[in-house]
């Protein structure tokens, strides 16, 4: 098994130089890992989790931050453009998840609370109770922050969210780089999304101290194959494991038209397939926070 995974990883590296879409190799590698690795965590049925990283949330933030090209947000787009994409795409995502009654974790950048925005009212007024989590205050990479700087980021984030009546329990580290985990407990967080990438994504929830790593399983974008995503779901159902999908709104296109097309082609079929399995009691939809509570309850009864 270990040698097979190494060969998949090597293939992925070669595919870059050969200009073969790396997404194909990634999906094959994920299939091999999910299929052959022994489950770390299992429940009475599979848990399906979606988390969405809101890196900016509003083009006004791009103006406040002088529209600079912040590499911690996006390598190529400036913050104004990312905010514009998210303003157009998030309502499409909410329409999809709300119409299916599926709760999702939306990780919010704290600076969004300092400008007039439509996103937070949209989430708070949603007919489905979504999990509104934290995504840093200025979207800085926590691994390059001192402890005092990281604490200040979390404090500003907490104050901003509380101005909207939100006490966040889930946290997503900017750029998916995990650091200063112990500080999350101080600010009342009960779970975070661990550091996932091509080699260490997984289907598990793990307690770290008094907080839970609701580990990422699959990073979604417009290059995914629906057939493979369905296969991942079937593996999770068979093994009764968590399956945590995550993405940014800009992963589905730069315009509302592109986003709608790719959401309809990839995300909607995935969600509908999972919904049909939920109706057969093969899986449960959870947010990061509710999945962590589920894991905590299971751990305390074992």
Image (cartoon, helix red, strand yellow):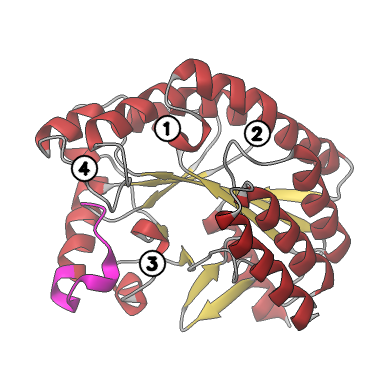
Q: In the visual, does 23 lie left or right of 283?
A: left
Quarter location, residue 68: top left
Q: Earlier in the sequence, mark 4 or mark 1?
A: 4
Q: Which residue is mark 2?
A: 267
**Which one is nearer the viewer's eye here, 54 or 191?**
54
Residue 159 locus on image (x, y percent)? 19, 52
Q: What secondary structure is found at the residue carrying circle 4?
A: loop
Q: Is residue 75 above or below residue 12?
A: above
The magenta segment: 138-149
Q: Which residue is mark 1?
A: 123
Q: Is residue 62 magenta?
A: no
Q: Which residue is mark 3?
A: 177
Label total for image: 4
Circle 4: is it few (<14), some (14-19), or many (20+) Cα within 10 Å? some
As measured in the structure, the alpha-carbon distance from the residue carrying label 2 to the one carrying label 1 is 19 Å
As measured in the structure, the alpha-carbon distance from the residue carrying label 2 to the one carrying label 4 is 28 Å
Q: What secondary structure is found at the residue carrying circle 3?
A: loop
Specify whether residue 194 is in view. Answer: yes
Q: Which residue is mark 4?
A: 69
As measured in the structure, the alpha-carbon distance from the residue carrying label 1 to the one carrying label 3 is 26 Å
Quarter location, residue 108: top left
Circle 1: is it few (<14), some (14-19), or many (20+) Cα within 10 Å? some
- Of badges 2 and 4, the one in the foreground is 4
Picture residue at 23% right of the left edge, 31% below the top: 80
- Of badges 4 and 1, the one in the foreground is 4
Circle 3: is it few (<14), some (14-19), or many (20+) Cα within 10 Å? some
Q: Earlier in the sequence, mark 1 or mark 3?
A: 1
- Of badges 3 and 4, the one in the foreground is 4
Do the residues under discs 2 and 1 have CB atoms within 8 angstroms?
no
């Amino acid at each position: 098994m270990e040698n097979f995974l190494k060969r998949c990883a090597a293939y992925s590296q070669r595919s870059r130089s050969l200009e073969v879409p790396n997404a194909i190799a990634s999906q094959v590698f994920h299939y091999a890992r999910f299929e052959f690795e022994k489950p770390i965590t299992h429940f009475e049925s599979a848990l399906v989790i979606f988390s969405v990283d809101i890196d900016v949330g509003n083009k006004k933030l791009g103006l406040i931050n002088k529209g600079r090209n912040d590499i911690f947000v996006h390598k190529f787009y400036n913050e104004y453009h990312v905010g514009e994409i998210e303003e157009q795409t998030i309502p499409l995502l909410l329409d999809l998840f709300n119409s299916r009654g599926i709760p999702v974790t939306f990780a919010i950048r704290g600076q969004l609370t300092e400008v007039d925005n439509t996103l937070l009212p949209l989430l708070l007024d949603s007919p489905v109770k979504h999990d509104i989590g934290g995504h840093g205050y200025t979207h800085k990479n926590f691994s390059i922050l001192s402890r005092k700087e990281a604490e200040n980021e979390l404090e500003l984030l907490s104050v901003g969210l509380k101005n909207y009546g939100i006490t966040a329990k889930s946290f997503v580290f900017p750029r998916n780089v995990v650091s200063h985990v112990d500080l999350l407990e101080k600010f009342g967080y009960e779970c975070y999304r661990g550091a996932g990438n091509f080699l260490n994504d997984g289907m598990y929830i793990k307690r770290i101290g008094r907080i839970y790593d609701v580990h990422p399983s699959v990073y979604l974008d417009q290059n995914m194959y629906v057939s493979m995503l369905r296969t991942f779901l079937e593996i999770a159902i068979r093994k009764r494991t968590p399956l945590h999908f995550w993405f940014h709104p800009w992963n589905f296109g730069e315009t509302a038209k592109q986003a709608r097309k790719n959401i309809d082609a990839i995300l909607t079929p995935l969600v509908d397939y999972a919904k049909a399995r939920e109706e057969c009691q093969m899986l449960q939809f959870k947010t990061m926070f509710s999945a962590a509570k589920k894991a905590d309850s299971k751990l305390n009864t074992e």
